[in-house]
Amino acid sequence: GLYSEFLGEELDLYEDNYSLFGRYCMEMLRAVRLVVDPGIHAFGWSFDQALDFMIEKTFMDPKMLEVECKRYVTFPGQACAYKVGELKLKQLRKKAKSALGDKFDIKDFHDVVLQCGAVPLKFLEYEVNEYIKEELETLMTLESLED
């Protein structure tokens, strides 16, 4: 989900500055989630403390933030999981791009990720590492055939 929003910006799919502003407002909400979720569940924040923090740090409607805050109270860790997944995908993509250089194909990378389905991030990392290894082996084979 969050990774695809990043892709939308990267591919210049946001049609105007208002749409892009909306994306950044949502990004701010997600950053606030990374504070609020552990604040509630690990540091003993009250609902009102969490809500006040969200209102202070975002541009969102307080009523909507109240609903969001109730969600965080009900589902510990969920808010952080979304961002962790996005960051992991970006890290794996950067690793693949670095290893494969100009032979990196974003479509192939996304195919590998999507073929994994909903899996633990460690498994996804393993599959991306296998993809990198196989691509490098193919490149080395092609280079040796050219010699």
Image (cartoon, rainbow, N blue to C red):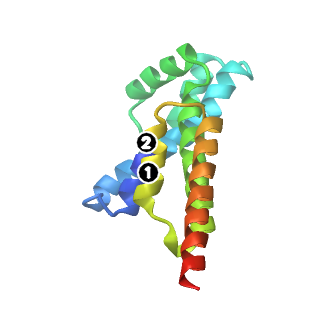
Q: Amino acid at mark 1?
A: His
Which residue is pictured at 62% across the width and 27% down the height?
37
Q: Nearer the viewer, residue 116 or 133?
A: 133
11 on left or right of 110: left
Which residue is pictured at 51% across the width and 22% down the height?
69
- Seen as rendered, the residue at the extreme bottom is 147
Q: Secondary structure at mark 1?
A: helix
- Seen as rendered, the residue at the extreme top is 74
Identify residue for label 2: 114
Which residue is pictured at 54% across the width and 13% down the height?
74
Q: Nearer the viewer, residue 39 or 118?
A: 118
Report which quarter residue 76 is drawn in.
top right
Q: Are marks 2 and 1 in contact (CB under 8 Å)?
A: yes
Identify residue for label 1: 110
Report which quarter residue 7 is drawn in.
bottom left
> Where is residue 13 drawn, in percent x and y?
29, 59
Q: Amino acid at mark 2?
A: Leu
Q: Residues within 10 Å of mark 1 (few under 14, many from 20)?
A: some
Which residue is pictured at 50% across the width and 34% down the height?
55
Give the number of callouts.
Answer: 2
